[in-house]
């Protein structure tokens, strides 16, 4: 078995992982693992932008208050304040890297950043690059990494499991590295490291309909749970209200910035409906908008609702939303002349691996940053465009903490090679595809936008059966990326269901018909793995 040794192993190549690598590249040897190409993560597809206090009329306190309100009482205020206070610093750093954010000339003739507004925000504070901000950030981060001699990028490498001292029979709980599947060779390799960082993104692929790319399979959350880390608030899965409804647009998102610039949600008869659900109308937080759309679709028996910005000037639409305009036009929809059909889709995992404000997990040299983590920033509902901000703020915090720790000695522990002597090639891959479809269907039907105890219990029984089948399959056959993702999704699905069963109230993204009211006290849902502590 091939063994590779590094100071830092980063699993995941989105904004969080690449930011951390750049921050450490001068002093540490860093390996970054990417399941696919770097442009296949959620960062690449992030249309909206980065929330930051940049306008003179805006304040840090206002951004904090908006985030707390959107989070429905569950945000950790100290974490929110820490994140927002570092927002300007993040934007300055990105500009130094060469990210060319959109600008506009104001009445005085000054050229300033163009800021847009999204749901839950009381001010224009979303700095962006047209409607492809994530792609621009990912490109610039990746370009900078290509100049770093200390950073090695491993593409088509999928982490199988974390290796801890406890797992190899050694006293202690340090994370020693990971077993990793090289998809090109189909061989498992060992990566050893002083520090391991999970920057693997969320788990929205657990749902049948999602705006996320195929890489969003909850790998980091599942691996951390198996390694003995707590997870928190996984019942809060954000459904983006406006995913394009078209058979050829499997996960194409219509950014919230459209609504920030005046796009209206309408029913098939052309009438607006959001005012009946919230006084903020289309600019209500995402959980409210998604539930309103879900309610109207079920009430009318319609397949979708519509998002209409066609009343705005065509030049404004094509200049501010060029990628959305072009993609919709490819599909026969001209958003300058007609509304676009939309439906809610699973979009963001608000919970994740429990960390502190350095990104440190329950294991002393294992970190989690970005969507894989639970920092307490998002509470019961993530406010739009706080996610890219979180990625870079906590990547910087983790980098600072690692630099403070220094290059500690690697434990003198013998790690056994990956053992596949008892497995064979499978002739039953249909098991993977069938279980994959079943999982995503019942998660959508039973653990979706609106829940009940009965639905959750049905989902729990089914996920337990799937877990037994896939565990047996995993033990008997050679592993593949599809099998690893299915195994991780089943683990995360079970954690989501357990968390949802525990919450006996409706708060934020968790809405249950059995408990429609709020509990008097807002409490996080923390799940503790077997043998914890």
Image: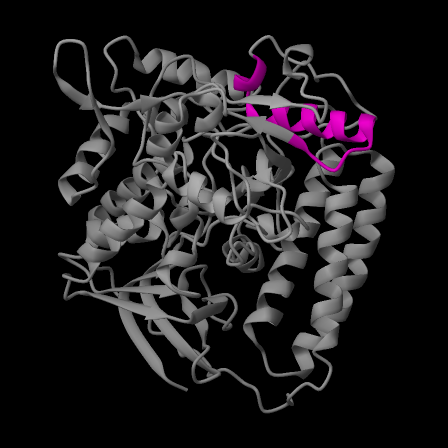
Query: Front-most of 177 and 95?
Result: 95
Q: Residue at 54% of width from left, 37% of height from top?
A: 350
Q: Is residue 20 magenta?
A: no
Q: Main secondary structure of the magenta part?
A: helix
Give the left or right position of residue 450, taking residue 308 as reference.
Answer: right
Considering the image in quadrants, where does the N terminus appear?
bottom left
Residue 483 versus residue 384 in the image, above or below: below
Q: Residue at x 28, y 45 (%)?
A: 137
Specify whether 237 is left or right of 152: right
Q: Which residues are magenta?
A: 281-305
Residue 286 on the magenta segment: yes
Left or right of residue 334, residue 467 in this image: right
Q: Nearer the viewer, residue 166 or 456?
A: 456
105 up-or-down from 208: above or below: above
Provide residue 99's location: percent of width, then percent of height. Answer: 21, 41
Residue 175 or residue 397, whichever sits in front: 397
Image coordinates of residue 107 in percent, x first then y, are 18, 9
The reply to whether residue 368 is in sight is: no
Left or right of residue 58, residue 205 in this image = right
- The residue that appears at 65% across and 47% down in the rendered structure is 209
Residue 292 occupies quadrant: top right
């Amino acid at each position: 078995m091939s063994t590779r040794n590094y100071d830092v192993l980063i699993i995941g190549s989105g904004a969080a992982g690449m930011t951390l690598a750049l921050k450490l590249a001068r002093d540490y040897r860093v390996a970054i693992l990417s399941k696919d190409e770097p442009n296949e993560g959620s960062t690449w597809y992030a249309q909206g932008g980065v929330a930051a206090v940049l306008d003179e009329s805006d304040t840090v306190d206002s951004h904090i208050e908006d985030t707390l309100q959107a989070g429905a009482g569950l945000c950790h205020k100290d974490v929110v304040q820490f994140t927002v206070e570092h927002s300007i610093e993040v934007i300055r750093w990105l500009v130094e890297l060469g990210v060319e954010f959109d600008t506009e000339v104001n009445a005085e003739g000054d050229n300033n950043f163009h800021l847009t507004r999204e749901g839950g925000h009381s001010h224009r504070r979303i700095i962006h690059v047209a409607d492809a901000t994530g792609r621009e950030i990912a490109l610039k981060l990746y370009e900078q990494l290509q100049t770093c001699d200390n950073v090695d990028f491993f593409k088509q490498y999928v982490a199988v499991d974390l290796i801890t001292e406890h797992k190899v029979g050694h006293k202690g709980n340090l994370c020693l590295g990971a077993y990793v599947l090289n998809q090109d060779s189909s061989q498992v390799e060992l990566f050893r490291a002083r520090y391991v960082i999970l920057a693997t993104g969320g788990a929205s692929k657990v749902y049948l309909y999602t705006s996320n790319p195929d890489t969003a399979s909850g790998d980091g959350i599942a691996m951390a749970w198996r390694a003995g880390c707590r997870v928190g608030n996984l019942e809060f899965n954000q459904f983006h209200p406006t995913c394009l409804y078209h058979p050829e647009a499997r996960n194409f998102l219509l950014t919230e910035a459209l609504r920030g610039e005046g796009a209206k949600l309408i029913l098939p008869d052309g009438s607006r409906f959001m005012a009946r659900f919230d006084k903020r109308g289309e600019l209500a937080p995402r959980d409210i908008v998604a539930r309103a759309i879900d309610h109207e679709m079920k009430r009318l028996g319609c397949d979708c609702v519509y998002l209409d910005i066609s009343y705005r000037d065509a030049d404004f639409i094509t200049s501010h939303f060029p990628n959305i305009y072009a993609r919709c036009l490819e599909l026969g929809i001209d958003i300058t002349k007609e509304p676009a059909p939309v439906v809610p889709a699973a979009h963001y995992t608000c919970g994740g691996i429990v960390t502190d404000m350095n990104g440190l997990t329950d294991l002393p040299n294992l970190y989690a940053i970005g969507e894989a983590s639970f920092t307490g920033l998002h509470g019961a509902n993530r406010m739009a465009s706080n996610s890219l901000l979180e990625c870079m703020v906590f990547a910087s915090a983790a980098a600072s903490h690692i630099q403070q720790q220094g290059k500690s000695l690697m434990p003198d522990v013998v790690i056994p090679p990956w053992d596949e002597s008892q497995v064979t090639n499978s002739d039953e891959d249909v098991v993977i595809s069938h279980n994959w479809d079943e999982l995503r269907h019942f998660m959508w039907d039973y653990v979706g936008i609106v829940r009940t105890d009965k639905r959750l219990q049905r989902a729990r029984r089914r996920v337990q059966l799937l877990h037994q089948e896939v565990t047996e399959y995993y033990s008997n056959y050679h592993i593949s990326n599809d099998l690893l993702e299915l195994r991780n999704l089943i683990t995360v699905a079970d954690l989501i269901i357990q968390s949802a069963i525990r919450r006996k109230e409706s708060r934020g993204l968790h809405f249950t018909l059995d408990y429609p009211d709020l509990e008097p006290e807002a409490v996080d849902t923390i799940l503790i793995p077997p043998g914890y502590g």
